Amino acid sequence: MALDFDLQDPGTQKTIAAFLVPIVLLYAFFHFMVKPRVNDLEMKEKEVATLRHQVEVTQNGLRRPAELKGEIAELQEKYDELETLLPEQENVSELLNQLSAVEHQSKVYLVGFNAIETVDGNGKPYRANKYKVVFESGFHQFAEFMSEIISLPRIMSFSNLRITMNYDAAMQEENEGLADQPRHLRVECVMTSYVFNTPGSE
């Protein structure tokens, strides 16, 4: 039995768009944002470990302190910059403030934020703090939110991304004139922030 499938029909086009757009967004997000961020994490953690070693060697060197002062200051400056990306401790309050600022700027609605677990780096010098994040937005706002989060002065990543249509909110937008702040997508994901695993820390 043949199906009557008219591509010229606006309803059919809307259905296809609702199905294909999230898939395209997911592919672009993981390919252009998550993968480079993971590579960046691996490079930064190696650089942090190298700088720690260089600072220790410099401080314990046999040269006079006056000769070492400039080199120590330069290395400490680089280390401080890297520590911003990979802090030694998680500051949840600061993380929530950053999320709130990004939420307001990108015009999404954060409706859920829960800590899940902390995962050791399996021998690597970092720990991964995982949070379940739920927000509502439009397609454009979703992309801007993810871009802004990745641009924060922290090494972060997203996984287990699940996008569903929020039809009730879409109808409300039409009735209340909220087209500039759409909520027709409901996005659930796991957000991971990374902290430096100092020797002896649990």
Image (cartoon, rainbow, N blue to C red):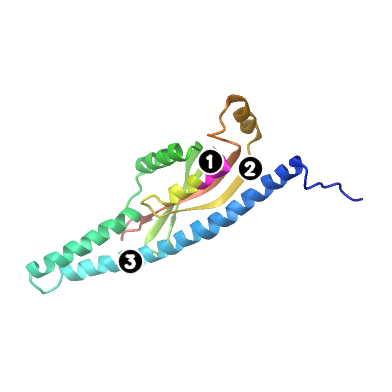
Name the residue type under label 1. Val
Seen from the viewer's position, the closer of residues 102 and 199 is 102
Question: What residue lies at 54% left-to-right and 60% top-to-bottom?
Answer: 31
Q: Quadrant of residue 170?
A: top right
Which residue is most to the bottom? 62
Seen from the viewer's position, the closer of residues 17 and 43 is 17
Q: Left or right: 134 with respect to 96?
A: right
Residue 112 magenta-highlighted: no
Seen from the viewer's position, the closer of residues 161 and 142 is 142
Look at mark 1 in the image and give the residue it sits on.
134
Local SS, label 3: helix
Q: Residue 23 — which label?
A: none
Q: Residue 164 — which label?
A: 2
Q: Give me the C-alpha separation between circle 2 and circle 1.
A: 11 Å
Characterize the local packing of mark 2: few (<14), some (14-19) or many (20 or more) Cα atoms within 10 angstroms: some
Disc 2 to disc 1: CB gap under 8 Å: no
Name the residue type under label 3. Glu
Q: Quadrant of residue 188?
A: top right
The boundaries of the magenta stretch are 137-143
Name the residue type under label 2. Thr
Position of residue 89 relative to residue 48, above or below, is: above
For residue 191, say whether it is visible. yes
Q: Give me the C-alpha separation between circle 3 and circle 2.
A: 39 Å
Look at mark 3 in the image and give the residue it sits on.
47
Local SS, label 1: strand
Residue 8: x percent and y percent? 77, 45
Position of residue 126 relative to residue 149, above or below, is: below
Characterize the local packing of mark 3: few (<14), some (14-19) or many (20 or more) Cα atoms within 10 angstroms: some
Q: Left or right: 162 with respect to 131?
A: right
Give the main secondary structure of the magenta stretch: helix
